[in-house]
């Protein structure tokens, strides 16, 4: 928790959204607290405050993992890439001009770094890391109590869907992950990817067609 | 049906992200187009599938910050996971880069890549006002090139005979094509315009559209407020005593087109000064009008794209060019560029009108 500093602090209720004033990861509603805004933390990080950057890492770790683990199939790669994303973010924080939301900036670095690292790892391994059969879907399948046949059916569906998403070209996979899994609006995705919203629509449309075809073939 | 124009709107439509007017047009189209309706259902189906999928993200590593801060502290930030490449991997990366460079080079050197072919089709300019009605000139002008006088070459997709230019049936059938779809003048409902020049029908062709369904200016229905098309048609006495007419059209994105045609002088008629007063095709050819300089770069043979266009309006078809309504021409001109929304297709078409 940062110290009270008018201008860079906002009121937030962790777990209740904070009306965009701060980003919180807690799912448990808590008491009214003062929590430093992203902008304040960014300003401090730009002044060399590593601790402030650490708080940003804490806030956005789920965001980054959400993108990375849905765009890659290997859990170990997801850890390495997430680490790389934050290291790059730290190195670049000085160039962040605060003209956009910090979250947009983080998403941009996450997407670009993920794609870049996936290509590097693919070259290193000599094969695609996007092999949907590498088992992440199995590892992520919910273990809620259900009848075995229901679990099997749902697992098959989820696995097919994940396989289909991972089989999409990177630019289409990216918009699918950001829109349908990260729940970003199309205009926000456009800002992340620095393209037009029409391009986002077009990519989503194409991705839907590909997914539909893949799922029809799979199931 | 111009389905492709609606299909690009299906994603925002399916999520309620369109304005009421555009959404209503999409709905009207969906009501009569089973293919697009099926496309919408497909999108919704996939969205439902993704929305209910159980694809949780991995939990962040417990030691994430410890690892990040350690790398920050020891200055190893540049040592990315991908940098831990084996030597063979590095060689492979170098080879891949070399292949990429070669591929880009070959693409640049290729006479015409597929996207270039598409743009060429878009850019293709044909003669709109090239011949009198009795003998319309069906020759197609080549796409604009850096060369001042490109050699004629056939269009990528020649029009079938059934959709050849139709002469304007009037006395001075000077402009030979009509729009594929009827054009109405929004500001004067009920007044049927006589289309004197229909450049939109003859200049640009989208490969996705049916043959013959061509327009100069496409219209982004999602952003009607951004519409901006203007133009002018000036005329004066030509060197042989006939009438010289210069047509200029420009739109957002730096696009412009111009043409100069000449014809023998017709019967002189009083020159109208307002759009509503232009009641006869003869007005276009009235002698004695104040001569206007031909647009820079204009040349005979029909409309041509200005050289600057290629560099300034890369998205001519579909995205960057938006037609507007009722843009008034230059004061001395006898007509205006007017466009109207074709409600059935959701596309505005710029055209030059005189009124009957």
Image (tube, rainbow, N blue to C red):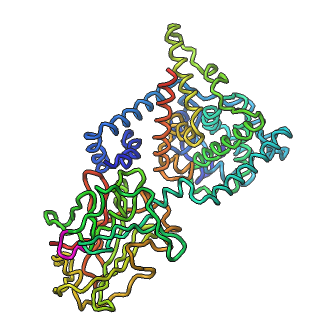
Please state the horizontal and vertical placement of residue B80, each as a whole percent of the image: 78, 42
Q: Nearer the viewer, residue B76 or A24?
A: B76
Residue A37 visible to the viewer: no
Q: What's the magenta region?
A: B169-173
Please state the horizontal and vertical placement of residue A134, each as a whole percent of the image: 67, 24
Task: Using the image, determine if residue B299 lies above or below residue A75.
Answer: below
Tell me where residue B12 sits by quadrant: top left
Task: Using the image, determine if residue A7 lies above or below residue B279.
Answer: above
Residue A46 visible to the viewer: yes
Please state the horizontal and vertical placement of residue B168, each as a whole percent of the image: 22, 68
Task: Using the image, determine if residue B16 lies above or below residue B345.
Answer: above
Dominant SS in magenta: loop
Query: Residue at 79% of width from left, 42% of height from top?
Result: B92
Q: Nearer the viewer, residue B225 or A125?
A: A125
Question: What is the quadrant of the C terminus of chain B in the image?
Answer: bottom left
* Relative to B320, B229 lies left or right: left
Please state the horizontal and vertical placement of residue A9, each as a whole percent of the image: 59, 48
* Relative to A100, B153 lies left or right: left
Query: Residue at 62% of width from left, 35% of height from top?
Result: A71
Tell me where residue A132 sits by quadrant: top right
Task: Using the image, determine if residue A178 lies above or below residue A195.
Answer: above
Q: Is residue A219 magenta?
A: no
């Amino acid at each position: 928790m940062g110290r009270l500093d008018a201008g860079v602090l906002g009121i937030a209720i962790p777990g209740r959204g904070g009306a965009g004033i701060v980003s919180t990861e807690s799912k448990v509603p808590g008491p009214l607290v003062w929590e430093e805004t992203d902008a304040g933390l960014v300003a401090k990080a730009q002044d060399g405050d590593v601790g402030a950057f650490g708080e940003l890492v804490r806030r956005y770790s789920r965001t980054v993992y959400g993108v990375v683990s849905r765009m890659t199939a290997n859990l170990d790669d997801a850890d390495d890439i997430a680490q790389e994303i934050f290291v790059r973010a730290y190195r670049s924080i000085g160039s962040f001009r605060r003209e956009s939301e910090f979250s947009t900036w983080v998403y941009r670095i996450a997407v670009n770094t993920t794609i870049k690292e996936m290509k590097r790892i693919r070259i290193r391994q000599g094969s695609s890391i996007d092999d949907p059969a590498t088992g992440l879907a199995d590892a992520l399948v919910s273990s809620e109590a259900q009848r075995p046949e229901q679990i099997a059916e749902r697992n098959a569906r989820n696995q097919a869907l994940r396989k289909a998403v991972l089989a999409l070209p990177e630019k289409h996979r990216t918009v699918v992950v950001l829109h349908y899994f990260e729940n970003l609006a199309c205009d926000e995705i456009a800002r992340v990817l620095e393209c037009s919203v029409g391009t986002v629509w077009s990519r989503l449309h194409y991705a839907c067609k590909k997914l539909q075809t893949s799922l029809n073939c799979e199931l | 049906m111009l389905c492709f124009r609606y299909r690009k709107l299906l994603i925002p439509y399916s999520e309620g992200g369109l304005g009421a007017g555009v959404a209503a047009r999409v709905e009207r189209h969906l009501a009569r187009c089973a293919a697009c309706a099926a496309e919408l259902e497909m999108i919704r189906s996939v969205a439902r599938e993704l929305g209910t999928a159980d694809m949780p993200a991995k939990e962040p590593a417990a030691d994430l910050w410890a690892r990040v801060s350690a790398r920050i502290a020891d200055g190893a930030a540049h040592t990315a996971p991908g940098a831990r490449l084996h030597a063979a991997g590095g060689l492979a990366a170098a080879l891949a880069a070399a292949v990429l460079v070669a591929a880009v080079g070959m693409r640049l050197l290729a006479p015409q890549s597929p996207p270039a072919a598409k743009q060429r089709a878009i850019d293709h300019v044909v003669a709109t006002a090239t011949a009198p009605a009795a003998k319309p000139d069906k020759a197609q002008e080549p796409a604009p090139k850096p060369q001042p006088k490109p050699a004629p070459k056939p269009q990528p997709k020649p029009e079938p005979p059934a959709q050849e230019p139709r002469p304007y049936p009037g006395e001075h059938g000077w402009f030979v094509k009509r729009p594929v779809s009827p054009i109405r003048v929004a500001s004067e409902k009920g007044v049927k315009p006589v289309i004197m020049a229909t450049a939109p029908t003859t200049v640009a062709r989208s490969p996705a559209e049916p043959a013959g369904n061509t327009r100069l200016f496409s219209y982004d229905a999602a952003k009607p407020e951004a519409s901006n098309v203007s133009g002018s048609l000036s005329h004066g006495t030509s060197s042989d005593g006939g009438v010289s007419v210069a047509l200029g059209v420009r739109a957002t994105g730096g696009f412009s087109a111009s043409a100069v045609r000449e014809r023998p002088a017709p019967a002189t008629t009083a020159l109208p000064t307002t759009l509503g007063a232009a009641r006869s095709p003869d007005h276009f050819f009235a002698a004695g009008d104040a001569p206007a300089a031909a647009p820079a770069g204009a040349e005979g043979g029909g409309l041509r794209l200005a050289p600057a266009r290629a560099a300034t309006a890369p998205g001519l078809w579909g995205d960057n060019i938006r037609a507007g309504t009722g843009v008034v021409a230059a004061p001395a001109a006898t007509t205006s560029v007017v466009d109207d929304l074709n409600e059935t297709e959701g596309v505005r078409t710029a055209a030059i009108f005189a009124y009957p």
